[in-house]
């Protein structure tokens, strides 16, 4: 069996369950030594007492398969604990090569009902958590590159969501955090390319504890037989590939993945441009240009972002 990650070391955050778990297992299967990070709280909203059990269970699974792994139960949204996570990987395995950011929580609420704490907590875990680990991993790679006088090996795989692409009415905090992660990823890709590091972001669609209610409606039921199209196992191979030497030319990219499908998403493009015939636009001129352009769009009260963007149920 080919082991493209042999001799590499990796961190996977939120790796005690769901997507993070299968991603950690896949990296280990491909030869990487893995730091399995999970804060261990039982509630998908970040509630309940933290515990080492989920991370340690995945570590045990990796070791039973002959791999190397280390459990870390720190909170990636805490700046100093994120520093400690990167240091733990370097101390245990000599260096860090791969960072997979997956940790997250949900605090769903409509925007007109959301509390400040519900907003802050989701942005803290998703967006700040991605930044914290990226910041210390990036410093590690920059220092190594400067010491070597040459690029080093570094891979970042971040986790966004189609909630950012299509909107999610009951998740303004989550959608905003996931959009921020895309911006963080593209900025990181530009900043670290000269050091040999790539940074990419995925939008996975998978049936996990985080999405159990999202995929509970008609058309999303798991099949009676065979692998569920929404199984997290469909996502893990892409993460393993993006972490590998084969993906050296892939940088700053956004990929949607689920059910045996990978789609590369283009950066936003200008759909149409209007130019004023005067020194600057007037209200009347804008009304004459933009109102007809949007005349065929649904009214606000019936607007459905998923339908407009063509994101149908599969």
Image: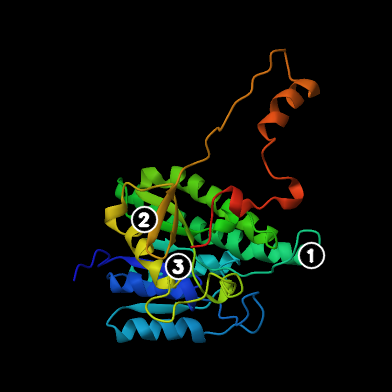
| Image x and y of residue 286, in percent | 74, 25
Where disc 3 sits, the SS reads helix
Q: Earlier in the sequence, mark 3 or mark 2?
A: 3
Callout in the foreground (1, 2) = 1
**Real-space CA distance between mark 3 and mark 2, rounded to the nearest whole angstrom:** 15 Å
CB of mark 1 within 8 Å of CB of mark 3?
A: no
Q: Please say whether residue 4 is visible from this viewpoint.
A: yes
Of 211 and 144, nearer the camera is 211
Q: Residues within 10 Å of mark 3 (few under 14, many from 20)?
A: some
- Marks 3/2 in contact by CB < 8 Å: the verdict is no
Q: Is residue 235 left or right of residue 112?
A: left
Instruction: Find disc 2 in the rendering and name its residue.
Output: 154
* Spot occupied by residue 64 in the image (x, y as percentages of width and height): 31, 87
Residue at image mark 3 = 87
- Residue sitting at x 66%, y 64%: 122
Q: Quadrant of residue 156?
A: bottom left
**First in sequence: mark 1 vs mark 2:** 1
Q: Is residue 95 visible?
A: no
- Which quadrant is the N terminus positioned in? bottom left
Q: Alpha-carbon distance for marks 1 and 2?
A: 38 Å
Whether tag 1 and tag 2 are in contact, CB under 8 A, the answer is: no
Vertical arrangement, residue 272 with respect to residue 56, above or below: above
Where residue 101 appears, as percent x and y from the top left, is 49, 63
Residue lying farthest top?
Answer: 278
> Disc 3 vs disc 2: which is toward the camera?
2
Instruction: Name the residue: 55% across, 54% down.
Output: 181
- The residue identified by callout 1 is 115
The image quadrant that residue 92 belongs to is: bottom left
Instruction: Write down the quadrant of residue 29 in the picture.
Output: bottom left
Q: Label 1's element?
A: loop
């Amino acid at each position: 069996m080919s082991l493209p990650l042999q001799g590499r070391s990796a961190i996977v955050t939120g790796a005690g369950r769901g997507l993070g778990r299968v991603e950690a297992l896949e990296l280990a299967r491909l030869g990487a030594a893995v730091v399995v990070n999970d804060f261990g709280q039982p509630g998908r909203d970040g509630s309940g007492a933290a515990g080492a059990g989920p991370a340690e269970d995945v570590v045990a699974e990796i070791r039973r398969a002959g791999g190397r792994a280390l459990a870390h139960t720190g909170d990636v949204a805490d700046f100093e604990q994120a520093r400690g996570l990167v240091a733990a990987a370097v101390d245990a395995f000599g260096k860090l090569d791969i960072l997979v950011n997956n940790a997250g929580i949900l605090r769903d609420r409509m925007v007109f009902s959301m509390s400040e704490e519900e907003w802050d907590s989701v942005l803290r875990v998703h967006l700040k958590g991605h930044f914290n680990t990226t910041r210390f991993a990036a410093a590690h790679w920059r220092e190594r590159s400067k010491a070597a006088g040459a690029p080093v090996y570094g891979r970042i795989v971040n986790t966004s969501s189609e909630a950012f692409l299509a909107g999610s009415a009951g998740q303004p905090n989550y959608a905003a955090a996931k959009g921020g992660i895309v911006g963080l990823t593209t900025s990181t890709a530009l900043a670290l390319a000269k050091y040999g590091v790539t940074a990419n972001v995925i939008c996975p669609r998978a049936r996990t504890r985080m999405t159990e209610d999202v995929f509970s409606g008609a058309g999303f039921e798991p099949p009676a037989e065979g692998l569920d199209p929404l199984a997290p196992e469909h996502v893990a191979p892409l993460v393993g590939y993006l972490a590998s030497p084969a993906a050296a030319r892939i940088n700053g990219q956004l990929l949607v993945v689920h059910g045996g499908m990978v789609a590369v998403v283009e950066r936003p493009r200008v759909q149409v441009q209007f130019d004023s015939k005067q020194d600057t636009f007037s209200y009347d001129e804008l009304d004459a240009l933009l109102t007809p352009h949007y005349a065929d769009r649904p009214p606000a009260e019936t607007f459905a972002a998923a339908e407009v963007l063509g994101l149908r149920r599969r």
